[in-house]
Amino acid sequence: MEKNININLKVWRQKGPKAKGAFETYKLDGISVDSSFLEMLDILNENLINEGKEPVVFDHDCREGICGMCSLYVNGHPHGPDEDITTCQLHMRKFKDGETITVEPWRSAGFPVIRDLMVDRTAFDKIIQAGGYVSVNTGGIPDANAIPISKIDADEAMDSASCIGCGACVAACKNGSAMLFVSAKVSQLALLPQGRIEAARRAKAMVAKMDELGFGNCTNTAACEQECPKNISISNIARLNREFLKAKLAD
Amino acid sequence: MYWLFKSSIGRKLVMSISGLFLILFLTFHVCMNLVAIFSPEAYNMICEFLGANWYALAGTMVLAAGVFVHIVYAFILYFQNRSARGNDAYAVNAKPKNVEWASQNMLALGIAVVAFLALHMYNFWAKMQLVEILHKVGMDVDIANAQNGVFHIQNTFSCPIVVILYLVGLGALWFHLTHGFWSAFQTMGINGKVWFNRWKWIGNIYVTAVILGYVAVVLVFFIKNICSYGAACGI
């Protein structure tokens, strides 16, 4: 059965990185609870365009929770009140009729606002680049069973690799720390024999880049793990600390 | 060793090691305190032994350095983290579930612990080791009670207000340490999926035992005093 709700939207509007932002409130009537959060924003933007106003700028791409582009801070939670999903997978059935929904951008010095709800996350790309590649010459293609990897390690590396780099961890962190992201990216390679060869250099380079870009220091509150749409565990952070300290002590 | 100051993980390592050092100190401290419950004479012997000889003074200096490093790094990390957070605060802040309250308030708890420490130093250190040091450097001070620890315990914990302040201070310390303990091992990288809950349990049990030890000394002496003399708040 079709059910519609009326909502109030409190949306952060900001002209540019240096401009001063402020909230603006919009009323939206007759939103289907079956529509997704981003479809609801599409409706809002269509209304705004029809009224001759500037539409709200927000990031989105695949709209199926894989690309990591969507990034809204909805009612005090990165990716909204639902668990283990990205904003694009959030549905309006999670909200009540007459509710005021507050939509903010990721707020962190490492992610400056480009406009409205869109933030610049190239800092994450820079950290990935600093990590470099698995640049070992392997010669011809080895047999799949030439390098045995235990199921446990393979699974854990895969879990770490499920990080989509959306930045919800930084957005959730009271310290603006990027440790969950960096630790996932270090772990996905550190857990596998192919990645071990350059593990020490990678951990040092990625942590150095993370610090250089102005991300904060982790204080183990675990808010990142709770808000992560991909359930990345903070045991990755312990692994990153271990990899980094081992590398530094070996120098 | 430059990376201990320059990298985020290095700075956190300093926090974790200095913190664990302070927990170790608290463990020795509570062991000695518990002696006072069972044998006041034995406790005073410890006070005499740890008076103001060079070993005790060197130990005190190392301890003070540990406290100093932990506090200085706490503020460095706090201000760095605040600037990393950015200028605009969130309008709506929902605390994610399963996030410890203590973990988000470590600085406030730390400041409460420092205030408690100041009161504690005034109640005991200023009347014991400080008096001995002043005496040693030739100042005219009364050292009659400088090594009489039990006398100062009885004096301090005869006042209900001081007792309540101590219990509140110990409460703040409990919150600070329950987060700090497992957090230190996480920072040193000695943690993982399996050990995560183990460290939390070990930390909670250990810290609770230490804090209960302190609480026991405060309450035992308070109740003893109430029974024999009634409450009194002399300074």
Image: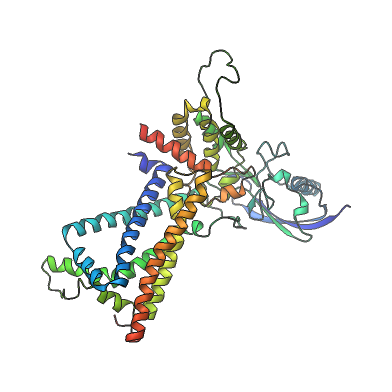
User: Which residue is painted at 51% across and 48% down in the image?
Assistant: B196
Query: Closest to the observer: B211 or B183?
Result: B211
Residue B191 pos. (x, y %): 47, 44
Residue A245 pos. (x, y %): 41, 38
User: Which residue is painted at 67% across and 49% down in the image?
Assistant: A83
Query: Closest to the observer: B156 or A29?
Result: B156
- Residue B208 drawn above or below residue B221: above
User: Which residue is painted at 19% across and 70% down in the image?
Assistant: B131
Total labels drawn: 0
Residue B9 pos. (x, y %): 43, 43
Q: Quadrant of the C terminus of chain B?
A: bottom left
User: Which residue is painted at 59% across and 40% down in the image?
Assistant: A120
Quadrant of residue B190 in the image? top left
- Residue B38 drawn above or below residue A15: below
For residue B111, side relative to residue A55 (left or right):
left
- Taking the view exactly as shown, the residue that stands out farthest to the front is B38
Can the viewer see residue A146? yes
- Taking the view exactly as shown, the residue that stands out farthest to the left is B138
Can the viewer see residue A18? no
Query: Closest to the observer: B38 or A136?
Result: B38
For residue A158, side relative to residue B35 (left or right):
right
Quadrant of residue B36 in the image? bottom left
Q: Quadrant of the N terminus of chain B?
A: top left
For residue A38, side relative to residue A13 (left or right):
right
How are the colours assigned in the image?
rainbow
- Taking the view exactly as shown, the residue that stands out farthest to the right is A1
- Residue B130 drawn above or below residue A62: below
Quadrant of residue A151 in the image? top right
Residue A198 pos. (x, y %): 47, 26
Query: Closest to the observer: A103 or B228?
Result: B228
